[in-house]
Image (cartoon, helix red, strand yellow):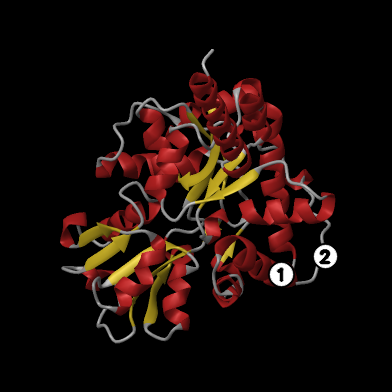
Amino acid sequence: MSPKRKGFLAILAWITIITILHLKLNLHVQWFGAKKAVEEEKFRVGFIPVTCHLTCPVTDFINRNMTGESSFEPVRFNGFPELKEAFLAGYIPATFILAPLAMALREQGVPIKIVYLGHRDGTAMMVNKDSRIYRIEDLKGKTVAVPNRYSNQRLLIYKALKERGMKITDLTMVEMPPPDMPVALRAHAVDAITSGEPFMAQTELDGYGRVLYLTKDVWPNFISCVLAVNENAIKNRRADVQYLVEGIAKSGKWLDQTMDHRMQASQFVAQHYYNQDPRLLTFVLSKPPDRVKYTGLKPLKKDFEEIEALAIETGIMQGTVRFEDYVDTSFAGDESTIEPYKFEGKF
């Protein structure tokens, strides 16, 4: 072999080694069996920084502080479109997601199953403090921001209007990521906003928003988001799903056990998971205390049949699937036997 060719091969080998080390050490790329092992170790759970997803980071934080590790990896998203795409792509085998969206995805053939709820109530509609909107009837001709076409907030508006002899076409609804809603209301880009907290409370705390209604007063025990998993996870990682559901249930009971627990959660979740001012969660979780509830989270057929009926009426579902198709109740046991986490850390 000529010296020139030897030199070329040496350079090529050096470049190859440097490239492999870069991929391995800096980009954390894995190969073959190693990649599969790493992926199987991580049970990713999607969430966005709203109160109906709060038990996800609470469970993760408590487990890490009590045992030094967590059985799953919480993955934060800023809105439902990217969260949905990550689930459809298989990046996250489990996620907190809008209840009607999960139901509609099942109808579209996506192998998704609801296994638990995010919380009860915990949603408000806010209007500008200086607006002349004081009743739901005053929304006629106005523009209202909702999280998603498949959100239960949209169905709640439909239900409230129907009960007052109005139609959904009496107002204009626009889809908007919840974190963007406060700015839009303040700028008068929309007349009202509704989504999971704490973004609604932000407008109230900052002095320009006023509560038109809390969902607990319009649709008692309102369900916004649910915990859903891919059926492949139920088949291949059932123990992980069961442990996740049990952890969410324990976190819910821990949150509702004392106001001190809620105040602790408002601090560590805001700091380590939501990247928010803790005053938002502090306000939402305490004023009033029943603004949001984290118990009674087992999926009930009667609740979902009501959502399903409204979804069919509004055209986001066709009515080709039923409760047993999109819900798996086998992971949610008797709630009376569930004990809250025994965790009393101070933050």
The answer to whether residue 236 is left or right of residue 149 is: right
Label 1 SS: helix
Q: Which disc number belongs to residue 308? A: none
Who is closer to the viewer here, 259 or 267?
267
Within 10 Å of disc 2 (Cα), the crowding (few <14, some 14-19, many 20+) is few
Q: Residue 16: where, in percent of width, then height?
A: 55, 29
Name which of mark 2 and mark 1 comes first in the sequence.
1
Residue 305 visible to an observer of this rendering: no
**Distance from the alpha carbon under mark 2 to that under mark 1:** 9 Å
Q: Residue furthest front?
A: 3
Q: Residue 267: where, in percent of width, then height?
A: 66, 71
Amino acid under label 2? Glu
Residue 85, above or below 64: above
Residue at mark 1: 264
The answer to whether residue 196 is left or right of residue 330 is: left
Q: Quadrant of residue 189?
A: bottom left
Within 10 Å of disc 1 (Cα), the crowding (few <14, some 14-19, many 20+) is some
Q: Residue 292: where, in percent of width, then height?
A: 56, 64
- The quadrant of the image that shows the N terminus is top right
Who is closer to the viewer here, 182 or 16?
16
Q: Residue furthest top?
A: 1
Residue 327, above or below 65: above
- The quadrant of the image that shows the C terminus is bottom right
Residue at 71% across, 69% down: 264
Residue at 44% across, 83% down: 206
Q: Which disc number belongs to residue 344? A: 2
Label 2 SS: loop
Q: Quadrant of residue 243?
A: top right
Are circles 2 and 1 on residues that touch, CB within 8 Å? no
Residue 145, above or below 211: above
Amino acid under label 1? Gln
